Amino acid sequence: MPKSFYITTPIYYVNASPHIGHAYTTIVADVLARYHRMIGEKTFFVTGTDEHGDKIAEAAQKAGITPQEYADKISAQFRSLCPELAITNDYFIRTTDPNHIETVRYILQKVYDSGDIYFGSYGGYYCFGCERFLTEKEIVDNKCPEHGREPQYIEEKNYFFKMSKYQDWLIDHIKNNPDFIRPERYRNEALAFLREPLEDLCISRPKSRLQWGITLPFDQDYVTYVWFDALINYVTALDYPDGEKFKTFWPVAQHLIAKDILKPHGIYWPTMLKAAGIEPFQHLNVHGYWNSDQSKMSKSLGNIVRPLDLKDKYGLDAFRYFLLRDMVFGLDSNFSEDAFVWRLNSDLANDLGNLVSRTITMAVKYCDGKVPEISSREKKSALYENALKTVAEVEASFNDMSLHKALIAIWDFINVTNKYIVENEPWTLGKDPANQEKLTAIMYNLLVALRSIAVLLQPFMPQTAEKILRQIGIDESQKLDMTSIKKDDALKAGSTLTRGESLFPRIVEEKESKPSKGKASMIDLKPEIDYEEFAKVDLRVAKILTAEAVPKSNKLLKLTIDIGEERTIVAGVGKDYTPEELIGKNIVVVANLKPTKLMGVESYGMLLATDTDKGLTVLTFDREAKTGAKIR
Ligand SMILES: [Zn+2]
């Protein structure tokens, strides 16, 4: 029996149009689905829309249409985003679908019958942005920190789910299954949340206050929406309880979400499943936010980069590549058009585009426009060995959800292949007919490398992969999977090679014509300053003497440093360095920064660091530096 794979995106709330966050989640799910299909697994991929609740009813009223009409309109926008982003979902679910409503009512009745839903009175502070009651701890300065507005005190009778009953079970489950929630930082966050007593979950609204939900099977005067509605979509899509799909795919279910909905997915959903007698899902994969100008790109702040604008401007595959390559899965990432263009020019136009075009051009010239025939003993080149290594790295990256690493591995191979051309100088060999046999073998190895690259790129950049394959004489009908990279008859001798158009033409920045900047810059620079302004910053070499964690902070470290005198600074590098690693290092600090208090600790200066693919890296010196010395 082939292995199975089930991936879901959250169902998107139809109170606003799609933005880059939605595009990213959906593209990641698509890459996973394409990859698992390619390695021969039976795959099911679901996305869709969440359509009930206050905000929808409100928005519909404003627009002068019914909630259903409103939901239809926005849901259609999300649905049409799928083909535009080359998304290969197998199913698109809507919470207003009759089969979903039936499943929600079935599960509610089941949990009610088993005694885990009760009727009670509840008074609390309700955030209309979150559409739930906030706990005391969540309210900061009388406001919901997520939405910046004051929650309202509401008291009413409602139905509650006995979530508290499952707290201990959930803690054990998370502890016994280390990758149940991943990456680890989010597992830790969920466990931290579970250190406090879990409250029961209010799952209903009286119809007097909200009509736009699913009527409870055991009380006609109440509806449910949000969690007991939306989360259940993941099993509705598999025809729970009796569907074949449910049997095949639920045991391997993986959810993909952004970190803002960790709590409902990591806490509410597993306890709901437990109460309903359904096994927990296998993995919850959590990613960070795309930031622009330091503020979160979320539906509530309205800070939105229209994803399709960039896709249309630079092409879909470049767009997919940028999102997947630039975000370390789990961490936040900064979005900028300049960074996008830089990636496009460097990785796509220079590395990949040039490799494909010069290989095909040379192969057409030196091999009469056809895949050459070579003897089998020449087929195992160093390039071939390197391709196998790349396959293993890509497989490992998919297994631990670090897709950017898969792309780094593929680009390493692209660069090894480019180097192979430079070292072997086919153009020199081509001058003397005596070298023909050697030249033919080199060209064959390069064509096989292109084929491997195209196969590896298929999940990420399907259109580009197809264009490369067409140029080396492989049409869509030929089944290409990862195992085909390992076979040495991957290319058929005699297939026609075709030179194609440039895969990724370089983007020339319009900025270059702007006279205001002395030198055109591809990066997002701050405004120019003169030397005197720079000279005001006192940078020093500092030796780290001691380092310890700041209590109650998972990120801050308190450092004692020597800059000719002893000082204390607080630095946010605790997630990336252990205190032991830092002690003894010579680093760079801003020594004349105004003191500031962080988590109760006074900090007299700031260290310099940069973001890398492996997290923050502190600036150090590549020769022994003198403690306290000025940096200029
Ligand atoms: Zn809120």
Image (cartoon, grey):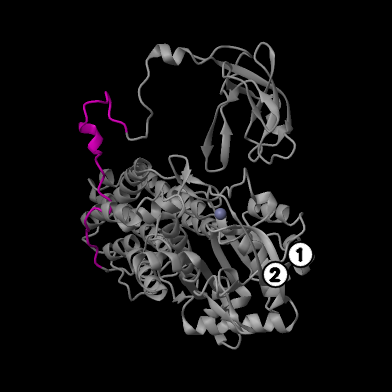
- Mark 1 or mark 2, which is nearer the start of the sequence? 1
User: Residue shown at 66%/84% (left/top)?
Assistant: 109
* Mark 1, secondary structure of its residue: helix
Q: Quadrant of residue 103?
A: bottom right
Q: Identify the residue at the far bottom of this view.
A: 242
The image shows residue 117 at horizontal and vertical percentages of: 71, 76
Residue 271: mark: 2
Report the span colored magenta: 496-521
Q: Please, is residue 395 above or below residue 99 in the view? A: above
The image shows residue 628 at horizontal and vertical percentages of: 62, 12
In the rendered image, is residue 372 in sight?
no
Circle 2: residue type: Thr
Mark 2, other Cα within 10 Å: few <14 / some 14–19 / many ≥20:
many
Q: Please, is residue 556 above or below residue 117 in the view? A: above
Q: Quadrant of residue 571?
A: top right
**Location of mark 1 (residue):** 167
Spatial separation of the CA atoms under disc 2 and disc 1 = 8 Å
The N terminus - image quarter: bottom right
In the rendered image, is residue 533 in sight?
yes
The image shows residue 351 at horizontal and vertical percentages of: 35, 46
